[in-house]
C-alpha cells in the first residue's frame, strides 16, 4: 500500500526510480501489502524511455519480451505495432501500465534522492531528497538503471574536435 503521508512513519521500502524496474518493484511490493513509496527524478514514469526521446530510439529486444509478465490480462490487452518497438510506443506502454495499476500515486516525481544512509543500530535507511523529504525505511530498492549518466571517453582533443 502507498501512504499519501509517507513521511510521518517509517516505510517498509523506498524505491528510487520509476523506470521499468522501479515500476515492477512498486507493483510487487504493494501486492505484498508493504508500505512503499518511490522517488523519481523525471516528471513521469519510464526511466530511459522517458528521458531518451531522440529520433530512431527503439528497443533492441522483441517488444513482447520487453513486456511485464506479472499479468496475463495486461499481456492480452496490449498489442505491439512492431516486433522491435520505437521509444514513443514503449513509453506509451509504460504509461498504460502505470495507469492500469495506479503506480503513479506511489511515486513523488521531479525529485532526486540526495542520500540513503543505513543506520546499523536501528536497521533502517534514512533517505533524503532534493525536495526536502526525509524518510525512514527498512529497505531501499535502487532502480536507477545504468543509462542515466553519459560515459564520455577521455580522448585527447575531444573538446576542440569540430566533426
Image (tube, helix red, strand yellow):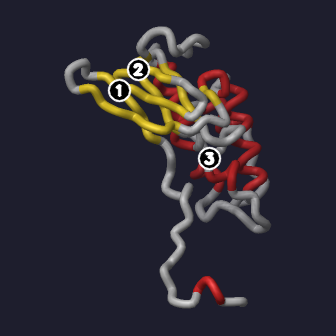
What residue is shown at x 46% (from left), y 14% (from top)? 33
Outermost left residue? 121
> Residue 136 got which mark?
2
Locate residue 105: give its quadrant.
top right
Foreground residue, 32 or 70? 32
Crowd rating for badge 3 (residues with CA inside 10 Å; few <14, some 14–19, many 20+): many
Foreground residue, 97 or 140? 140
Task: State which tag comes first along the sequence, 2 or 1.
Answer: 1
Give the residue number, with chain letter if any, for mark 1.
125
Q: CA distance from mark 2 to mark 3?
A: 24 Å
Crowd rating for badge 2 (residues with CA inside 10 Å; few <14, some 14–19, many 20+): many
In the image, residue 144 lies at what x, y percent?
50, 46
Crowd rating for badge 1 (residues with CA inside 10 Å; few <14, some 14–19, many 20+): many
Residue 62, compared with residue 130, is above or below; it is below
In the image, residue 150 lies at what x, y percent?
56, 65
> Residue 47 got which mark?
3
Count of labels shown? 3
Q: Does the CB distance between marks 2 and 1 fall below 8 Å?
A: yes
Label 3: which secondary element: loop
What residue is shown at x 65% (from left), y 54% (from top)? 63
Q: CA distance from mark 2 to mark 1?
A: 5 Å
Task: State which tag comes first along the sequence, 3 or 1.
Answer: 3
Left or right of residue 13: residue 162: right
Left or right of residue 113: residue 40: right
Left or right of residue 65: residue 43: right
Amino acid at each position: 500500500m502507498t501512504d499519501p503521508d509517507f513521511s510521518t512513519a517509517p516505510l517498509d521500502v523506498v524505491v528510487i526510480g520509476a523506470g521499468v524496474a522501479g515500476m515492477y518493484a512498486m507493483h510487487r511490493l504493494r501486492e505484498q501489502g508493504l508500505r512503499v513509496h518511490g522517488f523519481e527524478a523525471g516528471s513521469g514514469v519510464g526511466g530511459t524511455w522517458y528521458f531518451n526521446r531522440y529520433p530512431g530510439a527503439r528497443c533492441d529486444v522483441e517488444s513482447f519480451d520487453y513486456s511485464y509478465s506479472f499479468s496475463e490480462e495486461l499481456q492480452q490487452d496490449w498489442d505491439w505495432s512492431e516486433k522491435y518497438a520505437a521509444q514513443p510506443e514503449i513509453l506509451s506502454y509504460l504509461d498504460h501500465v502505470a495507469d492500469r495499476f495506479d503506480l503513479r500515486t506511489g511515486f513523488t516525481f521531479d525529485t532526486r534522492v540526495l542520500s540513503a544512509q543505513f543506520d546499523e543500530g536501528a536497521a533502517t535507511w534514512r533517505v533524503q531528497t532534493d525536495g526536502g523529504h526525509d524518510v525512514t525505511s527498512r529497505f531501499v530498492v535502487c532502480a536507477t538503471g545504468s543509462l542515466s549518466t553519459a560515459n564520455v571517453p577521455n580522448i585527447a582533443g575531444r573538446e576542440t574536435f569540430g566533426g
